[in-house]
Image (cartoon, rainbow, N blue to C red):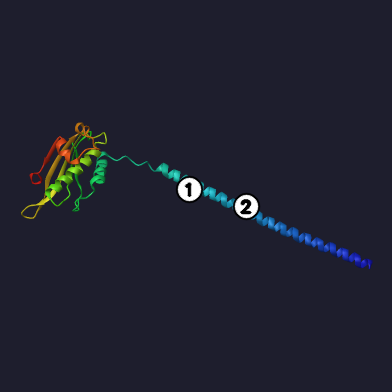
Amino acid sequence: MGRYSVCRKVLFVLIMMVLIIMVSGCDSSEFNEAQKTSENKTIKNNNFVEEDTTINNKLEEESESKPGQQELSYEEWLRNIIIETVGDKTNYGKPRIESIIFLDENKTDMEITLWADDNLTAGLIRNGAIIKSSEILRKIYSDDRAKNVLIYWLFPVKDVYGNEQMLPIIQIQLTRETANKINWQGFNPLDLEKVADIFHVHPDLQ
């Protein structure tokens, strides 16, 4: 019985040692796995930070390499003002702007030639061009550069042979001095005829 008891104790000790070794191995593997997972997350986070930094650096480099929006030339600015105000084409599809000509080196004196829209009557064609002229002149003189603006309005007509010709129907000239007298907010556009330095309408549109 004594030997049997000793064997049982030895066997019990061996079993306990095996269990301890197994548990230690599991804990170690779990610890190693957790450590690997943590390291992977750290690597991913570092990669993300590096990628984010790289992206930001690229954006900064691009923004530095690309120059800021260049200022428009005065002619381009005038063209944009006209197109924004009265459209780039007439209601019969003709390009609105025929020409913009500067008469001095400083580009303060100019002739602007535009095509007028068609309408039901000659009077409506005339009034439409006057109203559009008033708005264009208001915007041009909101800038400090212009000193004298002459606007010509053209309209296509056909002769007896069916050939289309350009007919100058309205001529309006407004100087800076006159423009400064106008309260544009309360101004009736059709009164441009009364205040303009030069105002001429083709007899067919009188």
Looking at the picture, which amino acid does disc 1 mark? Ile
Q: Which one is nearer the viewer's eye here, 198 or 107?
A: 198
Q: Which one is nearer the viewer's eye here, 174 or 3?
A: 174
Mark 2 to mark 1: distance in Å? 24 Å
Q: In this view, does 11 lie to the left or right of 79?
A: right
Percent across and percent down for residue 124 are: 15, 48
Q: Which residue is drawn at 17% across and 41% down?
A: 190
Percent across and percent down for residue 122 are: 12, 48
Which quarter of the picture shows residue 182?
top left
Percent across and percent down for residue 47 are: 55, 50
Q: Is residue 196 left or right of residue 63?
A: left
Q: Is residue 175 left or right of residue 34?
A: left
Q: Which one is nearer the viewer's eye here, 26 or 155?
A: 155
Residue that carries the numbered disc 1 in the rendered image: 55
Mark sitting on residue 39? 2
Q: Can residue 174 be seen from the camera position used here?
A: yes
